[in-house]
Image: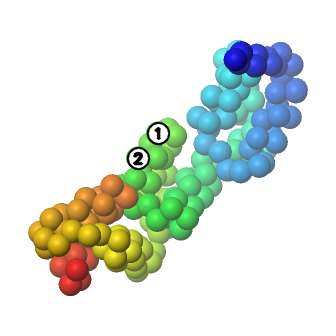
Amino acid sequence: METPKKTKITDVNVAMAKAEHYCAYQERSQQEVRDKLYDWGLWTDAVEHIITRLIEENFLNEERFANAYAKGKFNQKAWGRIKIKQGLKLKNVSPVLIKKALLQIDASDYMDTLTRIIDKKASTMAEKDAYKRRYKLQQYALSRGFETDLTAEVLKNREL
């Protein structure tokens, strides 16, 4: 089966309109927009010009993106700070903005979420050996991006 050919955009104004629509649909990082513009076949000069205009017209705001990403991944997917931080790094968000975005997550909600996902996972496990069970729960929480010390604290307070 043949892959459909990508249509190349040569007009900067058409690309600008499509980029505005792309950014208006949901928050995007600069890197996502840059990649999309290169996929459309634009040259470096045109890409940087469009990125600059999108920032000036407030279609593209890296801080707004970082906050939305962190809040969304925490609330919707119950990711921990470590996994959110890695995701933002992959989107080439600056460390200062990553730190600000992670501070938006409420500490009590964070602990409640960690406790909830550990309890939910514990209820589905068949492991009888207490040490293995605890280890598996800790590994699960770590894979979701939660910190080791917080996970250990929650497991210590739980009789699983």
Q: Position of residue 60 (x, y in %)?
A: 69, 44
Q: Quadrant of the C terminus?
A: bottom left
Q: Position of residue 89 (x, y in %)?
A: 44, 42
Looking at the rendered structure, the kind of residue marked 2 is Gln
Left or right of residue 139: residue 103: right
Residue 72 seen? yes
Q: Residue sitting at 21 percent across and 68 percent down? A: 127
Circle 1 sits in a helix, a strand or a loop, which is it? helix
Res. 123 mark: none
Q: Quadrant of residue 33?
A: top right
Q: Please determine whether, in this image, residue 37 is positioned above or below residue 26.
A: above
Looking at the rendered structure, the kind of residue marked 1 is Leu
In three-dimensional space, the C-alpha distance between marks 1 and 2, rounded to whole angstroms, equals 6 Å
Res. 86 mark: 2
Q: Please determine whether, in this image, residue 36 is positioned above or below residue 102.
A: above
Dots 1 and 2: beta carbons under 8 Å?
Answer: yes
Q: Please determine whether, in this image, residue 144 is positioned above or below residue 18.
A: below
Q: Residue sitting at 53 percent across and 68 percent down? A: 75
Count of residue discs: 2
Residue under numbered circle 1 = 90
Q: Quadrant of the N terminus?
A: top right
